[in-house]
């Protein structure tokens, strides 16, 4: 599975969960005479938590992985510069 396909599935699932939570809230509110039962609230909360975490984890990991790659590239470049400088002095 390519990275693009994985992200499409991940974000579409997140959006669908959030839309399902909002829809369930509106449907429950208007069909039950402006009252939302506790089970429905739990379902809505779980949809929001799951949808948000699917999006948030990917953004968090992508950022930290990119930061780690940048740090490693910086160390490698410094090491090569030090080696080049020491080779030119010899």
Image: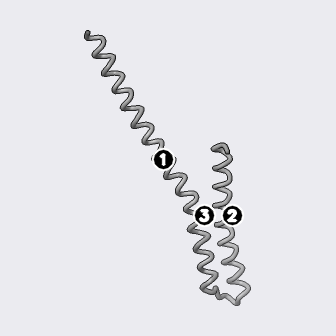
Q: How is the image coloured?
A: one colour
Q: SS of the residue at dot 1?
A: helix
Place of residue 49 in the rendered image (x, y in percent of width and height, measured from the top left):
56, 68
Q: Earlier in the sequence, mark 2 or mark 3?
A: 2
| Quarter that holds the N terminus | top right
Q: In the image, residue 61 lies at what x, y percent?
A: 50, 50
Extreme residue in the bottom direction: 33
Above or below, 79 against 38 in this view is above
Q: Position of residue 53 (x, y in %)?
A: 55, 62
Give the tally of numbered discs: 3
Image marks 3 and 1: residues in contact by CB distance under 8 Å: no
Question: Is disc 2 in contact with disc 3, using a CB cutoff of under 8 Å?
Answer: yes
Which residue in the protein does label 3 denote?
Answer: 51
Is tag 1's residue or tag 2's residue first in the polypeptide sequence? 2
- Quarter assignment of residue 32: bottom right
Q: Residues within 10 Å of mark 3 (few under 14, many from 20)?
A: many
Inter-mark Cα distance, 1 to 2: 24 Å
- The quarter in which the C terminus is drawn is top left
Graded by Cα atoms within 10 Å as few (under 14), some (14 to 19) or many (20 or more), the crowding at tag 2 reads: few
- Rendered location of residue 77, percent (x, y): 38, 26
Kindly identify which numbered label has been placed on residue 16.
2
Query: Along the line of sight, which residue is nearer the eye, 76 or 63?
Result: 76
- In the visual, does 63 lie left or right of 7? left
CA–CA distance in space, label 3 to label 1: 19 Å
Determine the CA span between mark 2 and mark 3. 8 Å
Q: Residue at x 66, y 43 (%)?
A: 2
Which residue is denoted by mark 1 in the rendering?
A: 63
Q: Nearer the viewer, residue 38 or 30?
A: 38
Q: Is residue 18 left or right of residue 67?
A: right
């Amino acid at each position: 599975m390519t990275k693009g396909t994985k992200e499409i599935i991940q974000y579409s699932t997140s959006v669908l969960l959030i839309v399902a939570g909002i829809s369930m809230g509106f449907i429950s509110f208007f069909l039950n005479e402006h009252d939302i039962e506790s089970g429905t609230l739990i379902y809505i909360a779980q949809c929001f938590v799951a949808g948000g975490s699917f999006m948030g984890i990917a953004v968090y990991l992508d950022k930290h992985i990119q930061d780690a790659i940048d740090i490693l590239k910086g160390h490698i470049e410094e090491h090569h510069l030090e080696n080049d400088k020491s080779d030119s002095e010899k």
